[in-house]
Amino acid sequence: MDLPMGLAVANPSVVLDGVSPGLLGFLAQMGIVHKTVFGKDLVITSGKDGTHVPGSMHYTGHAVDLRTVDKDPAGVDLLLHMLAYAVVGERIAFFDERNKPGGAHIHLEWLGA
């Protein structure tokens, strides 16, 4: 899958085929903003791949995880604030999962139909 400018995957095993078009559209916009602010691509670490909790929205293509280890704490705070602003009026929820087992990341979910 060709990714829009400003987006990258962590490695070739990340599966974005079958991820909700609404979520991918949101990520395309965030990728441009991220590239402008941080000077580097917004990295998706998981889509429909990987092992997640039972019932995870990853399995239906309605969730992705975003890398945070490439930012210092102030950078992660800025990204969280950017997301909080960007999701207003969107059918997107996000969760800071840096303290969860399995790696530091931000989890995004598509809540649309």
Image (cartoon, rainbow, N blue to C red):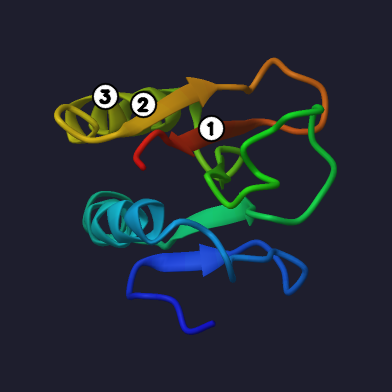
Number of other residues with Cα within 10 Å of mark 1, as a class: few under 14, some 14 to 19, many 20 or more: many
* 36 displayed left or right of 103: left
Q: Residue furthest bottom?
A: 2
Q: Earlier in the sequence, mark 1 or mark 2?
A: 2
Q: Amino acid at mark 1?
A: Ile
The answer to whether mark 3 and mark 2 are in CB contact below 8 A is yes
**On residue 58, which mark appears?**
none
Q: Residue at x 59, y 71 (%)?
A: 17
Q: Amino acid at mark 3?
A: Ala
Q: Residue at x 76, y 33 (%)?
A: 103
The alpha-carbon separation of the residues under discs 1 and 3 comes to 12 Å
Q: Amino acid at mark 2?
A: Leu
- Circle 3 sits on which residue? 84
Q: Nearer the viewer, residue 55 or 67?
A: 55
- Circle 1 sits on which residue? 106
Q: Position of residue 23 (x, y in %)?
A: 39, 51
The relative height of residue 71 versus residue 46 in the rendered view (above or below) is above
Q: For the residue labelled by badge 1, is the local secondary structure a helix, a strand or a loop? A: strand
- Circle 2 sits on which residue? 80
Q: Residue at x 70, y 64 (%)?
A: 14
The alpha-carbon separation of the residues under discs 3 and 2 comes to 6 Å
The relative height of residue 89 versus residue 59 in the rendered view (above or below) is above
Q: Residue at x 53, y 32 (%)?
A: 106
The relative height of residue 38 versus residue 97 in the rendered view (above or below) is below
The mark lying in front, picked from 3 and 2, is 3
Q: For the residue labelled by badge 2, is the local secondary structure a helix, a strand or a loop? A: helix
